[in-house]
Amino acid sequence: PQFINVLKGDMALVGPRPILLFEAKEYGERLSYLLMCKPGITGYWTTHGRSKVLFPQRADLELYYLQYHSTKNDMKLLVLTIAQSINGSDAY
């Protein structure tokens, strides 16, 4: 279903994961910065800890991605996502 949202233009392949309403408070003043971009199917938090990283560290990782995103880093995150999917690492 998320890939369909990418095709529709509502999501990106790589970007911050969508957040739930109650998670918005964890971003504080930085929430508007997070909401400036499309959410992604995978991202920095997804590939750098995921289930092991809770708030507020998750918010920091998502915002770190926004500061340093590039096509090269997005490609790296896609490869890491595929590798983690195959290996089953960081799954819930």
Image: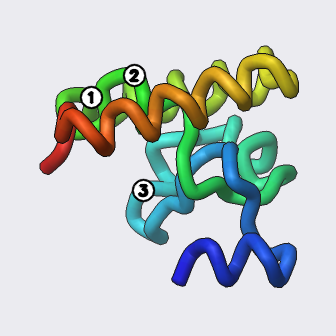
Residue 38 vertical position relative to residue 58 in the rendered view, above or below: below
The residue located at (71%, 28%) in the rendering is 75
* SS under mark 2: loop
Identify which amino acid the numbered label 2 is placed on: His
For residue 72, side relative to residue 81 (left or right) = right
Q: What kind of residue is marked 3?
A: Glu
From mark 1 to mark 3, how far is it between C-alphas? Answer: 14 Å
Mark 1: which amino acid?
A: Val
Residue hosting label 2: 48
Secondary structure under tag 1 reads: loop
* Label ID, residue 23: 3
The label number, if any, that marks residue 53 in the structure image: 1
Image location (x, y in percent) of residue 89? 19, 32
Closer-to-camera residue (50/59): 50
Of pointers 1 and 2, the one earlier in the residue sequence: 2
Circle 1 packing at 10 Å, graded few (<14), some (14-19), many (20+), is: some
Q: Is residue 85 left or right of residue 82?
A: left
State the CA–CA distance, disc 3 to disc 2. 19 Å
